Amino acid sequence: MGEALLVSVEDAARRLGIGRTLAYALCHQFEAGLPGGLPCVRLGRRLLVPVRTIEELGGRSVGPYDPAA
């Protein structure tokens, strides 16, 4: 099997260099449809972040997410 397409919020936070609490807050912001959230997917009670999102953010600071960027 290849690399996972989705990772936990905790793993996403580590990869992005931000805290777990901030990562969860950004996911909830995204779920609420507010700008600046961290795109995530809810599966049951779990919040997962697409690896592609993390790769797209790369070295950029976490702020308003612009899918066109």
Image (tube, rainbow, N blue to C red):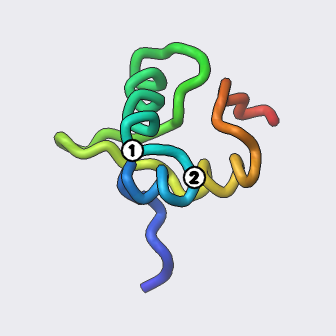
| Residue sitting at x 39%, y 44% | 20
Establish if 2 lies above or below 40: below
Q: Nearer the viewer, residue 60 or 31?
A: 60
Residue at the bottom extreme of this rendering: 1
**Left or right placement of residue 49 versus residue 16 in this view:** left
Q: Give the CA distance from mark 2 to mark 1.
A: 9 Å
Callout 1, which amino acid? Answer: Arg
Q: How many marks?
A: 2
State yes or no: discs 2 and 1 in contact (Cβ < 8 Å).
Answer: no
Q: Nearer the viewer, residue 12 or 45?
A: 12
| Residue sitting at x 47%, y 29% | 26
Establish if 65 lies above or below 47: above
Q: Which residue is mark 2?
A: 17
Element type at mark 1: helix
Q: Which residue is mark 1?
A: 20
Residue 63, percent from left and from top: 66, 28
Element type at mark 2: loop
